[in-house]
Image: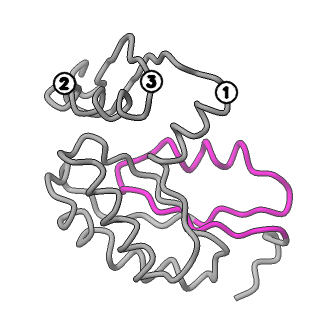
């Protein structure tokens, strides 16, 4: 399928159904000739295991190929899970196998963007419950950042 507005690039963006922020953020940043085609996967609860996440995303990964994107963007942050390096490897494998397309993982792109900006110290706001704050802090620390303050929005509700 040809995307008449995506003359430069078409991105398939995969999001949890509960994420209401990424799509409008991307829309506000969209350069001319680029389109973001959003696909949502069911998200009944925070998955504890990467295989559960993979099962939730599976059908949506198949759907995203229909728009013939140039790249798949996964707008999901699993750094709350135990062993985020293993989660990253599994998600990379899943995206490669299911789409055969180049892809970007948001949780890898964020630290890279922060490094490009010269950031070394962070204040982190997450949508996660306080119980997983230490995992998120550890993930950013492992990426080379000092986490000065952290707020889990799920804890504040």
Magenta highlight range: 8-37
Lower position in the chain sequence, tag 2 or tag 1: 1
Crowding at dot 1, Cα within 10 Å, few <14 / some 14-19 / many 20+, comes out as: few
Residue 59, given in percent of the width and then of the height, sits at 34, 79
Residue hosting label 2: 130
Crowding at dot 2, Cα within 10 Å, few <14 / some 14-19 / many 20+, comes out as: some
Lower position in the chain sequence, tag 1 or tag 3: 1
Residue 108, given in percent of the width and then of the height, sits at 48, 48
Instruction: Work out whether 15 lies above or below 98.
Output: above
Residue hosting label 3: 145
Crowding at dot 3, Cα within 10 Å, few <14 / some 14-19 / many 20+, comes out as: some
Question: Which of the two residues, 40 or 69, is positioned nearer the viewer here?
Answer: 69
Q: Quadrant of residue 3?
A: bottom right
Q: Quadrant of residue 24?
A: top right
What separation in Å lies between label 2 and label 1 (alpha carbons)? Answer: 28 Å
Residue lying at the far top of the rendered structure: 148
Q: Quadrant of residue 62?
A: bottom left
Mark 1 element type: loop
Tell me if residue 16 is in the magenta stretch: yes
Tag on residue 149?
none
| Mark closer to the observer (2, 1) | 1
Residue at 15%, 57% (x, y): give it. Answer: 49
Instruction: Work out whether 5 lies above or below 130.
Output: below
Tell me if residue 128 is in the magenta stretch: no
């Amino acid at each position: 399928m040809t995307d008449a507005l995506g003359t430069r690039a078409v991105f398939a963006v995969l999001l949890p159904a509960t994420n209401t922020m990424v799509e409008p953020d991307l829309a506000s940043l969209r350069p001319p000739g680029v389109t973001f085609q959003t696909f949502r996967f069911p998200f009944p609860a925070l998955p504890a295991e990467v295989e559960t996440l993979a099962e939730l995303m599976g059908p949506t990964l198949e759907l995203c190929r229909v728009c013939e994107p140039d790249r798949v963007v996964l707008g999901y942050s699993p750094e709350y899970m135990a062993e985020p390096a293993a989660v990253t490897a599994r998600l990379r494998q899943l995206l490669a196998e299911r789409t055969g397309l180049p892809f970007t993982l948001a949780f890898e792109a964020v630290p890279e963007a922060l490094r490009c900006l010269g950031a070394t110290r962070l204040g982190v706001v997450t949508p996660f419950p306080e119980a997983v704050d230490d995992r998120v802090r550890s993930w950013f620390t492992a990426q080379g950042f000092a986490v000065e303050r952290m707020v889990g929005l799920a804890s504040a509700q």
